[in-house]
């Protein structure tokens, strides 16, 4: 059974179909890529999975259970966590406090404050932010803010992690480090779906890729299969020859 599956998932904004009749299945333990031109519906699909938006029609199931209609906090406590295309950290709080919030309140069952603090420290080490523990989150570089957001999401103990353009705006060295972090997350047993425009990351980290265009799925397969698809080349890869 897939860890996540969607059937005919559809969402309109006015008369525009942002996501239209999209079917997908994500297998447990894989890194699943989601790509497409700007405005293709990728982040909208993340918003539907995480319940930030409700679908107009269709079904989304997590571990075989229908999650359409649930609240975002319920989705999180079921084991689905996410990051955002535009980084959302609590800027005036310390790096440690940001992750502590996730450890304290993001799980189905509350844990003791000492245990939450221990988890927060361990996760900051996992993402490489141990030396920044006391720094206000707003003072971190963009790359480190993205790592902080990942750590806070991981603090909820997810089984499925949605990463929305984690590598956007990063330099080559930071992208390589981010790719390694995604692989470590996968190795820890967490399934990952990642929206990304950095083709180096998509092609080297993902086992399968789904391509959206104008809200509809136009291709799905391995990186090799998708990169050879004539329609994908025409609508996406052709315009990103410099990626």
Image (tube, grey):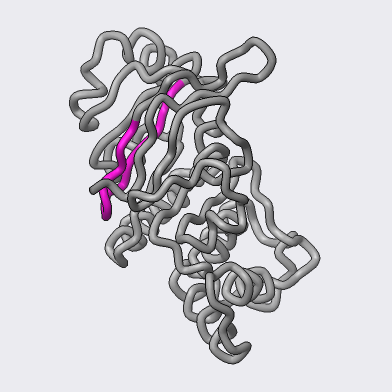
In the displayed structure, does residue 181 sit left or right of residue 112?
Answer: left
Image coordinates of residue 209 in percent, x first then y, are 30, 32
Residue extent of the magenta highlight: 24-36
| Residue 207 locus on image (x, y percent) | 23, 41
Compare residues 10 and 194 and report the one nearer the observer: 10
Report the front residue among 243 and 207. Answer: 207
Q: Is residue 165 visible to us here?
A: no
Q: Which residue is at 45% across, 60% downward?
A: 79
Residue 56 painted magenta: no
Q: Quadrant of residue 91?
A: bottom right
Residue 213 versus residue 65 in the image, above or below: above
Q: Position of residue 171 (x, y in %)?
A: 50, 44
- Tell me: residue 68, above or below residue 136: above
| Nearest the eye: 110 or 42 | 110
Q: Is residue 43 left or right of residue 229?
A: right
Q: Position of residue 165 (x, y in %)?
A: 51, 40
Name the one closer to the observer, 192 or 170: 192
Tally of numbered discs: 0
Asked whether, in this view, residue 22 is left or right of residue 99, the answer is left
Q: Quadrant of the C terminus?
A: top left
Q: Residue at x 51, y 22 (%)?
A: 19
Report the residue at 27% width, 26% height from top: 220
Please state if 156 lies on the left or on the right of 201 as rendered.
right
Residue drawn at (65%, 10%) of the image: 15
> Would you identify the image quadrant in which residue 23 lies?
top left
Q: Is residue 33 magenta?
A: yes
Q: Main secondary structure of the magenta part?
A: strand
Is residue 8 shown above or below 83? above
- The answer to whether residue 200 of the structure is visible from this angle is yes
Residue lying furthest bottom in this view? 114
């Amino acid at each position: 059974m897939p860890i996540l599956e969607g059937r005919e998932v559809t969402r309109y904004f006015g008369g525009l179909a942002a996501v239209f009749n999209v079917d997908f299945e994500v297998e447990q333990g894989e890194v699943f890529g989601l790509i497409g031109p700007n405005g293709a519906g990728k982040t909208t699909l993340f918003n539907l999975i995480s319940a930030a938006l409700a679908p107009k029609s269709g079904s989304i199931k997590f571990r075989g259970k229908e999650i359409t209609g649930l609240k975002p906090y319920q989705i999180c406590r079921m084991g689905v966590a996410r990051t955002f295309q535009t980084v959302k950290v609590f800027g005036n709080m310390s790096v440690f406090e940001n992750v502590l919030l996730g450890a304290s309140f993001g799980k189905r069952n509350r844990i003791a404050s000492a245990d939450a603090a221990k988890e927060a420290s361990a996760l900051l080490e996992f993402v490489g932010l141990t030396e920044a523990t006391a720094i206000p989150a707003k003072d971190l570089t963009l790359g480190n803010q993205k790592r902080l957001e990942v750590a806070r999401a991981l603090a909820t103990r997810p089984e499925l992690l949605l990463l929305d353009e984690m590598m956007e705006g990063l330099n080559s060295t930071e992208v390589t480090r981010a790719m390694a972090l995604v692989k470590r997350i996968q190795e820890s047993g967490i399934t990952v779906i990642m929206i990304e425009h950095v083709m180096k990351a998509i092609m080297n980290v993902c086992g399968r890729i789904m391509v959206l265009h104008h809200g509809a799925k136009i291709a799905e397969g391995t990186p090799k299969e998708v990169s050879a698809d004539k329609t994908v080349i025409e609508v996406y890869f052709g315009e990103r020859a410099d990626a």
